[in-house]
Amino acid sequence: MTEKISRVRHEYLRHDKKFPHVWCPGCGNGIVLGSLIRAIDKLSLEKDELVLASGIGCAGRMPAYVDFNTLHTTHGRALTFATGIKLAKPELTVLCVMGDGDATAIGGNHFIHAARRNLNLTAIIINNQIYGMTGGQYSPTTPYGANASTAVYGHIEHAFSIAELAITAGAAFVARGTVYHVRMLDTLLAKGIAKRGFSVIEIMSNCHTQYGRRNNMGDPVTMMQWFKDHGVSEQKAKKMSDEEMGEKFTIGVLADKDMPNYMEEYRRIQEQAQLK
Amino acid sequence: MRQLLTGNGAAAWGMRLAGAEYVPAFPITPQTEIIETISGWISSGELDARMVTMDSEHSMLTAAGTAAATGVRVFTATSSQGLLYAMEMLYTVAGWRAPFVLVNVSRALSSPITLEPDHNDVLAARDSGFLQIHCSTCQEVVDSLLLAYRLGEDERVRLPVIVNLDGYYLSFTREPVILPGEDVVSRFLPPYDPEETQFRAKDPLSQGVAVLGGSHYSYFRYETHYASQNGLSVFAEIGREFGDLTGRFYSLLEEYRTDDAEIVFFMIGSFATKAKEAVNRLRDAGQKVGLLRPRLLRPFPEHAIAAALRGVKGVAVVDQNISFGKGGILFAELASALYHIKERPLALVSFIGGLGGRDISNAEFYEMARVTAEAAQSGKIPPPRLLYTKEELARIQGLKAIASAGLHKEQ
């Protein structure tokens, strides 16, 4: 087992060049990265066929560590860079990794339109409910009442649900996981990457440094415990009242639609036009 | 009141002293400390203002412009990519002629990605209609904020103003700063009177409407140009008035040991403090060297510059920016300002350095002074120099060798 894990690591990570990584000790980003390479290994994808694009922020550092075709781009634009790559080279498997600030604030417009367009891309959104890298300012997913460096007496805006936003915007596959439920996360990522359509995997992750410390969860273990206590399956959630749900959130596959993706529609219209 | 403040802290204090009422914000390194400081004051009740963190710099600048158009005093801040992302709105809101202050904490642009400073970000806004004040010390940052509001709000100007400070070198450097007292501020910068620039449905006024055909359009663009140029005399006036109140006089240019100088460094921003150090050492060695630093870049104080350079033999223009395919932007600006001046310096020599936070060493300043003096004497002007040392080149060649070795291995 250990041998297999270390083989996978050496296969997919820029092991000798880029480590140690820049993330804080205990950061959830490393767990997501581990999960991502296990999912890719499970799908037996070739490195040359893989693209990982990111925007700016802590999550944006992830492409530096993987040995695929990688892009570290501008804030919020990972999906637009990915769109360009996918349309130029549809045969590539194109993944984006973003943070909540990156994907739903400055990049929010790109996110909903990529979902609506149903491009065959995978959007991995690490939601730590804060702008971590710039120093803990509130993001679109910071909960109402939570503290942030720009909301030192409690946040007065309400948070987006990234997964629900993605479903409403038309994404073919939407799942939510956490960095505590890692085996589930491996499966969700593999399903999302394999899906022929726009897939979104929202990953609740810990930024104990910027979010936790301001909200009585100043270490990774406390935050992990919080994820363990608050992530509930959809079946379980259905049986719970709003009061029982409270701050809890659903995890697992939340939407999975079979519909032609953008490239398939594109080819169909080309064929139709040629027949005339 | 004297305090130890970072450049960012000084910018926040400038906003606080100016009594700005509304602050749309968006975090970006290295500017973020400014909005964090302000949000802390607002939350604790120390400061009576409203602030909202928007979804992007584009929205932030839009909100700043519209708030200013309702007739309130507005502050906002950004850096680098954020300034570029807001660029569409920079041009738009300048045309509304609604003044407010935008602090830009300079950081070099992508790609490659960096966090450290040069001036390509703020120079991309050069032609937007925003006036530009460039600071070299933390004291100048807080004072420039007050000057900027007074300047932009003056009825002869009525334009938004960018106050620029260098990321890291100034934003995170702590210096002793004298904070002007309330009595000084209330005399120098009375509450903003927007006159006709406000929302009044009963007495409507249109700003920035669609005008086709070119004639109306040209008129408004020319008006903006004249208003910007008025900024020169207004700044000279208020800079003196500020000095009378505080003892700190601000003119269009900082002239450092230029009186009898034969060779002058010409540059903007905090790296000019490095040049001062080099000037002192060169003076100690008996060379007649000085420094000229424009505080205002827009409007461009060309007559003041030409006057300051009268009798100077050679100018070393140090550009912390690069216009690909042309060269240094300041160099081109200065050359065009001097062309018709009879007693212009014999040699203008272009140097590009300090990109992405790269240091400019004393040795490099000495070399620039030497090359410029030689050019002034011989009349042979060397081509623009891109500052890079032998050691740097060796290092990058080493890295390239490693990278290409990796490529061959994989093939």
Image: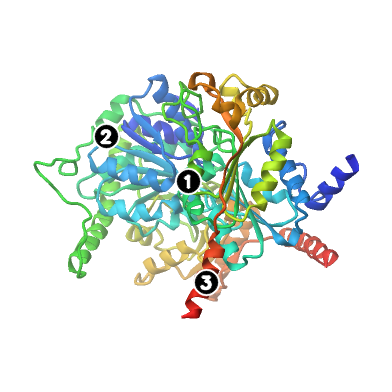
Q: Nearer the viewer, mark 1 or mark 3?
A: 1
* Res. A22 in view: no
In the displayed orientation, state which residue is furthest to the left.
Answer: B202
Q: Nearer the viewer, residue B114 or B212?
A: B212
Residue projecting furthest to the right:
A3
Report, in whole angstroms, how far the alpha carbon at label 3 lies from the one at label 2: 43 Å
Q: Quadrant of residue B389?
A: bottom right
Closer mark to the observer between disc 3 and disc 2: 3
Q: Can you say whether B75 is above or below A65 in the image?
A: above
Quadrant for the N terminus of chain B, please.
top left
| Mark 1 nearby-residue class (10 Å; few <14, some 14–19, many ≥20) | many
Residue at image position (16%, 41%) is B195
Q: Nearer the viewer, residue A7 or B95?
A: A7
Q: Chain of mark 3?
A: B
- Horizontally, is A215 left or right of A109 in the view? right
Spot occupied by residue A100 in the image (x, y as percentages of width and height): 54, 40
Q: Residue at the location (49% across, 74% down)?
A: A272
Helix, strand, or loop for circle 3? loop
**Amino acid type at mark 1:** Ile
Residue at the (70%, 47%) spot, across then down: A190
Label disc, if present, on residue A106 of the rendered structure: 1
**Residue B149 appears left or right of B382:** left
Q: Where residue B407 appears, x then y in whole percent?
A: 80, 65
- The picture places residue A217, in percent across and down from the top left corner, at 62, 21
User: Cβ–Cβ below 8 Å for labels 3 and 2?
Assistant: no
Total numbered labels = 3
Name the residue beneath numbered marker 3.
Answer: B325
> Chain under label 2?
B
Q: Which one is in front in this view, the residue at disc 1 or the one at disc 2?
A: 1
